[in-house]
Image (cartoon, rainbow, N blue to C red):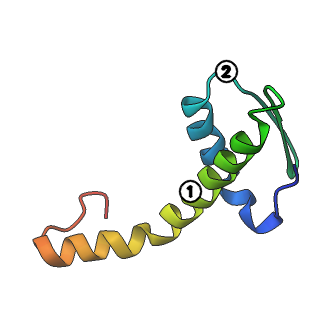
Amino acid sequence: MTIEPKLCPWLADAVARFRYLYPNVHLSISDQSVTLATSEDQMPAIVQDFMFCLYRQKIYSETLPLRTMLIEGVTGFVSRSA
C-alpha cells in the first residue's frame, strides 16, 4: 500500500507500534510504501489497523504540545524537560 507523503513523518513510530501489536505480520517499508504479509482473510483488518496506527500517531504528535500546556496549566507543574 502507498502512504501519502503528508503521513510519512509518523511512519516509523506507527510501524513500531504496529509490530508490537501484530508480531506475526511481516511488514516492510520502502520510501512511501508499506508491504504487509498475512493470510488473505485477515488482510483487510490488518490494513485497517495499520492505517489506524499511522493516523493515531499523527494525532498524538500534533496534539502533544497542547496536552502538555493543559496539564501544566491545571497542575501548575512545568515540564522538567523544558
Outermost residue to the front: 41
Please state if 54 lies on the left or on the right of 70 as rendered: right
Q: Name the residue under label 2.
A: 24
Q: Position of residue 26 (x, y in %)?
A: 76, 25
Horizontally, residue 58 falls left or right of residue 77, namely: right
Residue at the image position 20 percent from the left and 72 percent from the top: 72
The answer to which of marks 1 and 2 sits earlier in the sequence is 2
- Which residue corresponds to the image point at 62% horizontal and 60% vertical from the top-left? 55
**Label annotation for residue 57:** 1
- Tell me the CA gap for discs 1 and 2: 21 Å
Amino acid found under the numbered disc labelled 2: Asn
Residue 57: % across, % down: 56, 56
Q: Nearer the viewer, residue 42 or 24?
A: 42
Q: Are the two marked residues, 1 and 2, in contact with CB atoms closer than 8 angstroms?
A: no
* Depicted 26 relative to depicted 51: above or below: above
Quadrant of res 19 = top right
Q: Quadrant of the C terminus?
A: bottom left
* Residue 65 quadrant: bottom left
Q: Which of 37 and 69 is in front in this view?
A: 37
Camera-side residue of 64 and 23 = 23
Numbered disc 2: secondary structure: loop
Compare residues 10 and 76 and report the one nearer the observer.
Answer: 10
Left/right placement of residue 35 relative to residue 81 reads: right
Q: What element carries label 1?
A: helix
Q: Which amino acid does label 1 sit on?
A: Gln
